[in-house]
Image: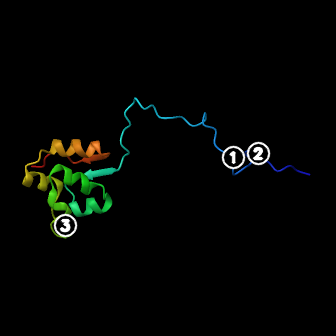
């Protein structure tokens, strides 16, 4: 008779995990924010916010306060890009890049186009 081999010699679903086997994060070391995705500053804001809803809060904290008004995202957001909005609001692209990086986003196409 062949023996049945289990990966665990004592398969018990109620067994608690060994705390020594799971590493604990170092509280003195700052944790990097979780990567949320790439943000192309030349894409429509509506499309970016549909893919990354957390972007709305980041934009509001940068000074794009109209983004939370009902209908603005679906109307002006169809053609407005982060680059155009930054120029309109006179917000430096470096400030946008820094804020989005702090929230875990990666900014692409940040170089100015002629």
Q: Do labels 2 and 1 touch, CB within 8 Å? A: yes
Quick one: which residue is furthest to the top in this view?
A: 28
Q: Which residue is mark 2?
A: 10
Tell me which residue sits at (76%, 48%) in the image: 6
Q: Which residue is mark 1?
A: 15
Is 68 displayed left or right of 91 in the figure? right
Task: Check residue 78 in the rendering and tell me which mark sits there, or answer none.
Answer: 3
Question: Please, what secondary structure does the residue beneath circle 3 have?
Answer: helix
Tell me which residue sits at (20%, 62%) in the image: 68
Residue 65 drawn at (x, y percent): 15, 57
| Mark 2 crowd level (few <14, some 14–19, many ≥20, 10 Å Cα) | few
Task: Check residue 103 in the rendering and tell me which mark sits there, or answer none.
Answer: none
Q: Nearer the viewer, residue 53 or 51?
A: 53
| Mark 3 crowd level (few <14, some 14–19, many ≥20, 10 Å Cα) | some
Question: Please, what secondary structure does the residue beneath circle 2 have?
Answer: loop
Question: Please, what secondary structure does the residue beneath circle 1 have?
Answer: loop
Tell me the quarter of the picture where residue 51 sits: bottom left
Tell me which residue sits at (19%, 70%) in the image: 71
Q: Nearer the viewer, residue 103 or 97?
A: 103
Is 85 displayed left or right of 56 in the figure? left
Residue 5 drawn at (x, y percent): 79, 48
Cα separation, mark 1 vs mark 3, equals: 53 Å
């Amino acid at each position: 008779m062949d023996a049945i081999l289990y990966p665990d010699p004592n398969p018990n679903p109620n067994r608690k995990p060994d705390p020594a086997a799971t590493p604990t994060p170092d509280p003195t070391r700052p944790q990097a924010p979780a990567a949320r995705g790439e943000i192309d500053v030349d894409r429509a804001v509506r499309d970016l916010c549909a893919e990354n809803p957390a972007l709305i809060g980041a934009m509001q904290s940068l000074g794009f306060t109209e983004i939370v008004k009902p209908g603005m995202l679906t109307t002006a957001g169809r053609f407005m890009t982060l680059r155009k909005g930054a120029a309109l609001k006179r917000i430096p692209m470096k400030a946008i890049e820094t804020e989005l990086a702090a929230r875990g986003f990666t900014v692409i196409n940040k170089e100015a186009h002629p």
